[in-house]
Image (tube, rainbow, N blue to C red):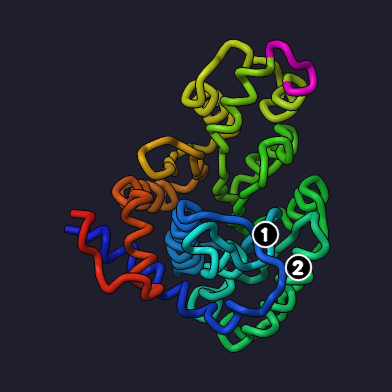
Amino acid sequence: MVDYYEWSKDHIKYLYEKIQSLKNDKLKTSPGDIWSVKKLLVLDYYLAAFVRIIRSVKSNFKNWYYVDPFCGSGLISFKDELKDERFPGSPMVAALRAEELPFTDYLLSDIDENTIKALSKRLLTNKKLVGNRTYDPQVMDFATSVGTIEKKKQFGNAFLIFIDPNGYKEIRWDLMKRLLNIETADIIFTFITSFIALNRSKADGDLETAKSLDAFFGDDEWTNYRGGEELLALYRKKMETTGKKTFVIGVFMKGGSKLYDMILATRSSGGGKVVESATKIMESVSTELLRSSFEVVSKRRREITDYF
């Protein structure tokens, strides 16, 4: 039986300790909170399994790419009592596993130039821990990154695409569909459930908001739905028209209020088994459990005393 507290503590510890030399580098950080750690643990878990499956003797793949079109600065910062702490962002999570679980290449991009400068410096500074390779993060918008990925779409190439935008307006359905149509691409997507539902509630009297939802969903079918769960189900249905199967891991604030859902989409039977396993674990790793684990790892408390 899995001890979910120990599982989360061990995984947080590995990633947290790796970036301590970068903690006070005064470079730009990406905003986060304790619940942000959960989506990064989802990535860490799935990434490891993805590489092991792809490079197995039964695999026909020659190249596999980690793709992060909203990569951020490489470190996330926290608020309030955790404001002095840092945790690796998605590109750093992938890079910290590169020595043991390398990808052929890492396609890292973000639209913000200062963010890319910070990430580039951190990858260079942390070179001993991120594998003997050259990373080349690029200033690029999502549309351009989709085109870059499509150029590498050929027999023998596989992709793990981590899509974690700051807001839903950064995602257009026509671009998402192009990625979903890559048969050998597994996708992890942050569906910002609470914010999408909030904007849906305003959209009937706000033409600009309605247009943004049209672009996100690809049409106006969203007008037939209201709450976050209904809109999530609609988006999953649209994703599955491309032949991929989708799975969902919810991410909640303290107290059970949902913030967003991690949608994992894959055509692979092996990938599906990994997602099912990840979902089972992550459903048991609550925000409260994450906070307790993080506070122990960061030595803000001795050991968990009040969770159970």
Q: Is residue 64 visible?
A: no
**Which amino acid type is shown beneath numbered disc 2?**
Pro
Q: How many marks?
A: 2
The Cα atoms of the two marked residues, 2 and 1, are separated by 9 Å
Q: Position of residue 51 (x, y in %)?
A: 50, 66
Whole-percent x, y for residue 28 in the image: 71, 67
Q: Specify start and end residues of the magenta stretch as a single range.
A: 204-209
Indicate whether 45 appears above or below 251.
below
Along the line of sight, the residue nearer the viewer: 136 or 25? 25
Q: Earlier in the sequence, mark 2 or mark 1?
A: 1
Residue 28 appears left or right of 63: right
Q: Secondary structure at mark 1?
A: loop
Quadrant in which residue 46 is drawn = bottom left
Q: Quadrant of the N terminus?
A: bottom left
Viewer-nearest residue: 174 or 91: 91
Q: Position of residue 200 (x, y in %)?
A: 62, 21
Which residue is under mark 2?
137
For this view, does 232 lie left or right of residue 1?
right
Q: Which of 267/257 is in front?
A: 257
Residue that badge 1 annotates: 71
- Residue 275, numbered label: none
Is disc 1 surrounded by few (<14), some (14 to 19) or many (20+) residues within 10 Å? many
Q: Residue at x 75, y 68 (%)?
A: 137
Can the viewer see residue 45?
yes
Q: Residues within 10 Å of mark 2 (few under 14, many from 20)?
A: many
- Contact between marks 2 and 1 (CB within 8 A): the answer is yes
* In the image: residue 81, left or right of residue 306: right
Residue furthest to the front in view is 80
Give the residue type that dot 1 points to. Cys
Q: Based on the displayed image, in which of its 4 quarters is residue 128 positioned?
A: bottom right
Q: Residue at coordinates 63% horizontally, 40% vertically from top-left? A: 180
